[in-house]
Image (cartoon, rainbow, N blue to C red):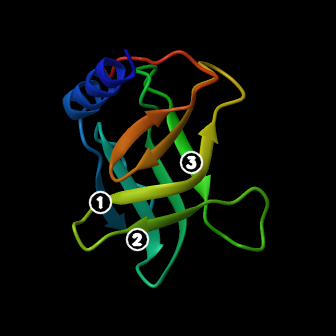
Amino acid sequence: MGKIKEIITKFVAWLLPEYKYRYAEDFPESIKENTVYIIGDKRSPWLLAFECPCGCKQIIQLNLLKEADPNWKFKVTNGNKISISPSIWRTTGCKSHFFIRNSKVDWARSRKRFSNK
């Protein structure tokens, strides 16, 4: 049974859209679906912004400034994949809890999985 679950999980992950990333000096006027905006100077960005992956259309803004709390980090791989840490857990609205790893949404186990709309 474990092997079947693993195959289904990999298949579902393959179906989910991949997140792109874009650098922007200022907060964009509109946020494109499945796009993480890295805002600020390329060498020292201060904010990540993207649409919540659950489909609620809310904009998530994540602080990158180390001296502020809470704060997040991001990593872009040579293959142009973005990962964000730690997890993103909305405390209002949809209350989604997820990770973005290798440009894919990975829903936290404590929350039911959503489909991307």
Label 3 near label 2: C-beta < 8 Å? no
For the residue marked with disc 1, what is the amino acid? Lys
Res 81 label: 1
Residue at 44 percent across and 23 percent down: it is: 54
Picture coordinates of residue 62, whole percent (x, y): 59, 52
Label 3 near label 1: C-beta < 8 Å? no
For the residue marked with disc 3, what is the amino acid? Gln
Q: CA distance from mark 1 to mark 2?
A: 20 Å
Picture coordinates of residue 4, whole percent (x, y): 29, 18
Give the answer, above or below, for where 7 lies relative to 42. Answer: above
Dot 1 or dot 3: first in sequence order is 3
Picture coordinates of residue 88, whole percent (x, y): 60, 41
**Depth-wise, is mark 2 or mark 3 nearer the camera?**
3
**Depth-wise, is mark 1 or mark 3 nearer the camera?**
1
Mark 1: secondary structure: loop
Mark 2: secondary structure: loop
Q: Left or right of 58: which side holds 3?
A: left
Q: Which residue is mark 3?
A: 61
Quadrant where the C terminus sits is top left
Q: Which residue is mark 2?
A: 25
> Which sits in the foreground, 7 or 89?
7
> Which sits in the foreground, 26 or 113?
113
Picture coordinates of residue 87, whole percent (x, y): 60, 45
Mark 3: secondary structure: strand
